Amino acid sequence: MGESRDVLLDLNNPVFQDDLLGLSKEEAARVLAALRKIKKLQWPQVYKDKGLHWELVQSKTGPKGARLYTIRLSERFRALVYREGQFMRFLSLHPDHDTAYS
């Protein structure tokens, strides 16, 4: 039996939690809606979803040399994430595209 392709979310990074809890009520609702959407997807769908716009960050690496990616969670926010098995591990939120890459 192969590994499940379902996406599991890891929102436990303290930086990500601080970023999320610092959002306005309206922006937090948009981000949570995107997280609900991701939770319903399988990994191949995440990669292809034009709304999420999964994109490699070439300028840095994550824990244990993991490749980092950004995904769009709202019109205003992108998240810095990496994949570990079934998990999409969230590292931080960025209010503009450029800060997610630096």
Image: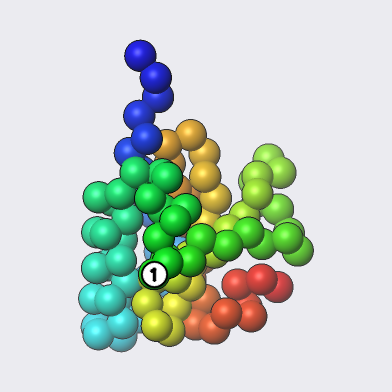
**On the rendered structure, is 82 left or right of 75?**
right
- Residue 49 seen in the figure: yes
Rendered location of residue 41, percent (x, y): 30, 49
**On the rendered structure, is 32 left or right of 16?**
left
Residue shown at the point (30%, 66%) measured from the top left:
34
User: In the structure shown, which secondary structural element does the residue marked by tag 1 occupy?
Assistant: loop
Quarter of the image containing the C terminus? bottom right
In which quarter of the view is residue 23 placed?
bottom left
Residue shown at the point (35%, 29%) measured from the top left:
4
Residue furthest to the top: 1
Considering depth in this image, is 43 or 69 the residue closer to the camera? 43
The residue wearing badge 1 is 51
**On the rendered structure, is 29 left or right of 47?**
left
Residue shown at the point (24%, 68%) measured from the top left:
33
Q: Amino acid at mark 1?
A: Gly
- Figure check: 29 above or below 56: below
Rendered location of residue 42, percent (x, y): 34, 44
Residue shown at the point (25%, 50%) measured from the top left:
40
Residue furthest to the right: 59
Rendered location of residue 65, percent (x, y): 71, 44
